[in-house]
């Protein structure tokens, strides 16, 4: 909870009326059973069930489209809260494999998308300059210095 | 005008034709693009969710590369635009975060001051000077083509940060969508079609982050149904992730329901380059899963 208070003023969340316009607007809530932004505010902030929420796999279903906070009548930063919850969950090892792989790739190549021989060939065929890797040593150092090694051990 | 081109990862690696389109239209419109050795932005629905501070520091590194050259940035992707804008906003407003990042970047000989501005390609082309030039100089008008737009959530949310992307720089809660692509497409002769739930997310991040493909494409499917209801001939997007979601999404949807009418999807850069005279072969439109035969009809008209 103290980390939450670092980032966000808890008072801002107390004004949540549980009106559920966030959940009603949420694309993931329409298609994923158990993904419910209104309930995250209720349980995490109002009921204090931090550990339970941080262990939920479904918190990762947020697409960060931000429609929830854009429509919230009290301007509660719901996406901000979810990103914070996901950050804390990742430190506790609750991190989907897809994202873990993506971040490993980012550390190794500087890109979030894998390259193949074909990517290089197609670019050449189109007359584009060859792909040039960014400075991956500097990138991985910056990521580590910012604390990414709290979450992934590839650094 | 001279700008740093921030291609992001997806376009140069997976859809290089969109990069060809960007370079073609920039040449035609006298925009000088400078290539710098940027990394991933990083994505606002990837690293940011996993480690906010690492996301902030790496984005700041990218911004330092362009700041060293004294250039503003042109992006081609909703996510890159959002990350680079929010990072600039945080680092110029939050002293604690600024010092944290300043300390890290300083060890690598970099210094963030926040003097540059971030613009998506669509923001730039929607300026009067470029609209006028596109209107008077297009080789292949998109006349008769009914086009719907999908911007990508990160292009316009949160409005407090991204509203300046909208033509008048103001946010209208009753019509919370930008207009930049509409202005560009109209200048090129296309007919704009609106559809229900136009501001709904494409659903891509759900699949990318969790691997829940069925649920992710169920969101996409809702949008495709509404787009078809409105009778669009083609969809214009401002983001390569959204592009993939709608292009692949229709293929998947056809597997379930053969009666679904498919429409081609284009990155806005592809449509502009085509209209300005770029040959379709040069744009590698074969990379599109949904056939783009609609353009052949225009070419032969």
Image (cartoon, rainbow, N blue to C red):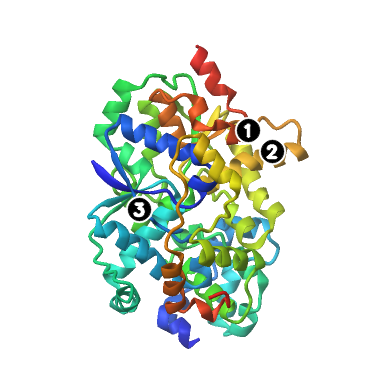
Distance from the alpha carbon under mark 1 to that under mark 2: 7 Å
Rendered-image quadrant of the N terminus of chain B: top left
- The residue where tag 2 is placed is B251
User: Foreground: B2 or A124?
Assistant: A124
Among the 4 quarters of the image, the one containing residue A51: bottom right
Residue B272 appears in the figure? yes
Q: What element carries label 3?
A: loop
Among the 4 quarters of the image, the one containing residue A141: bottom left
Say above or below: B116 vs B281.
Answer: below
Estimate the x, y position of residue B103 in percent, counting from the top left: 31, 78
Badge 1 vs badge 2, beta-carbon distance below 8 Å:
yes
Pointers 1 and 2 within a single chain: yes
Residue at 46%, 35% (x, y): give it: A127
| Residue B36, disc | 3
Which of the marked residues, 2 or 3, is nearer the chain's N terminus? 3
Estimate the x, y position of residue B8 in percent, counting from the top left: 45, 52
Badge 2 vs badge 3, beta-carbon distance below 8 Å:
no
Estimate the x, y position of residue A83 in percent, counting from the top left: 51, 70
- The residue where tag 1 is placed is B290
Outermost residue, bottom side: A2
Residue at 34%, 58% (x, y): give it: B161
Crowding around mark 2 (Cα neighbors within 10 Å: few <14, some 14 to 19, many 20+) is some
Crowding around mark 1 (Cα neighbors within 10 Å: few <14, some 14 to 19, many 20+) is some
């Amino acid at each position: 909870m103290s980390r939450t208070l670092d980032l966000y003023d808890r008072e801002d969340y107390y004004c949540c009326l549980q009106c559920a316009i966030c959940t009603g607007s949420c694309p993931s809530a329409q298609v994923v059973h158990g993904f419910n932004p209104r309930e995250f505010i209720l349980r995490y902030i109002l009921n204090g069930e931090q550990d339970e929420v941080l262990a939920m796999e479904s918190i990762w279903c947020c697409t960060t489209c931000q429609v929830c906070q854009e429509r919230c009548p009290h301007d509660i930063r719901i996406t901000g809260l979810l990103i914070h919850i996901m950050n804390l969950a990742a430190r506790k090892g609750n991190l989907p494999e897809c994202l873990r792989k993506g971040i490993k790739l980012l550390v190794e190549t500087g890109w979030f998308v894998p390259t193949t021989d074909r990517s290089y060939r197609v670019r050449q065929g189109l007359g584009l300059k060859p792909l040039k890797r960014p400075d991956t040593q500097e990138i991985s150092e910056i990521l580590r210095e910012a604390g990414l090694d709290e979450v992934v051990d590839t650094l | 005008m001279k700008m740093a081109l921030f291609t992001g990862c997806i376009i140069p690696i997976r859809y290089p034709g969109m990069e060809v389109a960007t370079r073609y239209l920039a040449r035609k419109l006298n925009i000088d693009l400078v290539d710098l050795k940027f990394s991933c932005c990083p994505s606002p629905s990837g690293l940011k969710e996993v480690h906010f501070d690492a996301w902030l520091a790496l984005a700041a590194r990218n911004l330092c590369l362009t700041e060293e050259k004294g250039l503003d940035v042109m992006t081609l992707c909703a996510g890159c635009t959002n990350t680079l804008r929010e990072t600039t906003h945080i680092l110029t407003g939050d002293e604690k975060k600024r010092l944290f990042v300043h300390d890290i970047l300083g060890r690598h000989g970099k210094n963030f001051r926040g003097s540059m501005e971030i613009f998506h390609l669509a923001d730039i082309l929607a300026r009067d000077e470029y609209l006028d030039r596109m209107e008077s100089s297009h080789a292949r008008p998109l006349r008769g083509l009914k086009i719907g737009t999908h911007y990508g959530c990160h292009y316009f949310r949160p409005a407090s940060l991204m509203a300046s992307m909208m033509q008048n720089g103001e946010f209208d809660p009753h019509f919370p969508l930008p207009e930049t692509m509409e202005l560009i497409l109209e200048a090129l002769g296309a007919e704009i079609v609106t559809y229900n739930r136009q501001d709904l997310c494409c659903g891509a991040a759900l699949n990318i982050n969790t691997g829940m493909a069925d649920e992710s494409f169920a969101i996409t499917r809702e949008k495709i149904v509404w787009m078809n209801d409105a009778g669009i001939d083609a969809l214009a997007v401002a983001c390569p992730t959204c592009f993939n979601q709608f292009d692949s999404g229709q293929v998947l949807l056809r597997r379930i329901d053969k009666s679904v009418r498919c429409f081609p999807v284009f990155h806005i850069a592809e449509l502009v380059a085509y209209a300005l005279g770029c040959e379709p072969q040069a744009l590698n439109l074969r990379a599109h899963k949904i056939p783009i035969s609609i353009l052949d009809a225009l070419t032969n008209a």
